[in-house]
């Protein structure tokens, strides 16, 4: 299991909330497979899902 995959799973589950971050870390320590499921990164297509999840939002028109 890659460290990168677990770390990004924590970030996805936390969604910017410190309480959720702590919970996601605890979940990963308890059973990392549950963490991957919660983040939607449990299958072999996880890198594409990370790209989609962390991609910057498309810029709208400013005029």
Image (cartoon, rainbow, N blue to C red):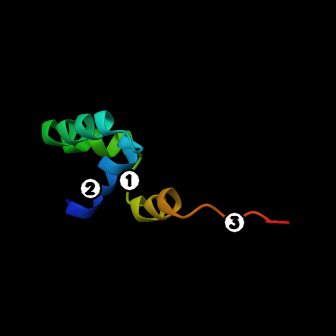
Q: Are marks 3 and 2 in contact (CB under 8 Å)?
A: no
47, above or below 32, in the image: below
Residue 22 screen position, x and y as percent: 23, 37
Could you tell me which residue is drawn at 53 percent across and 60 percent down? 52
- Within-10-Å neighbours for mark 3: few <14, some 14–19, many 20+: few
Q: Seen from this angle, which residue lies furthest left?
A: 29
Could you tell me which residue is drawn at 41 percent across and 46 percent down? 40
Which element type, helix, strand or loop, lies under badge 2? Answer: helix
15, above or below 63, in the image: above
Between tags 1 and 3, which lies in front? 3
Between tags 2 and 1, which lies in front? 2
Where, quadrant-wise, is the C terminus in this rendering?
bottom right
Residue 26, numbered circle: none
Q: Earlier in the sequence, mark 3 or mark 2?
A: 2
Residue 42 screen position, x and y as percent: 35, 49
Where, quadrant-wise, is the N terminus in this rendering?
bottom left
Q: What residue sits right under mark 2 in the picture?
A: 7
Q: What is the C-alpha distance between the residues marked 2 and 1? A: 16 Å
Could you tell me which residue is drawn at 33 percent across and 56 percent down? 8
Q: Are marks 1 and 3 in contact (CB under 8 Å)?
A: no
Q: Seen from this angle, which residue lies furthest right?
A: 63
Residue 2 visible within the image? no
Q: What residue sits right under mark 3 in the picture?
A: 59
Which element type, helix, strand or loop, lies under badge 3? Answer: loop
Residue 21 screen position, x and y as percent: 29, 41
């Amino acid at each position: 299991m890659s460290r990168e995959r677990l770390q990004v799973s924590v970030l996805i589950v936390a969604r910017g909330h410190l309480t959720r971050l702590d919970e996601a870390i605890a979940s990963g320590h308890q059973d990392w497979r549950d963490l991957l499921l919660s983040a939607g990164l449990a299958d072999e297509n996880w890198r594409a899902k990370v790209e989609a999840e962390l991609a910057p939002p498309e810029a709208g028109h400013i005029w």
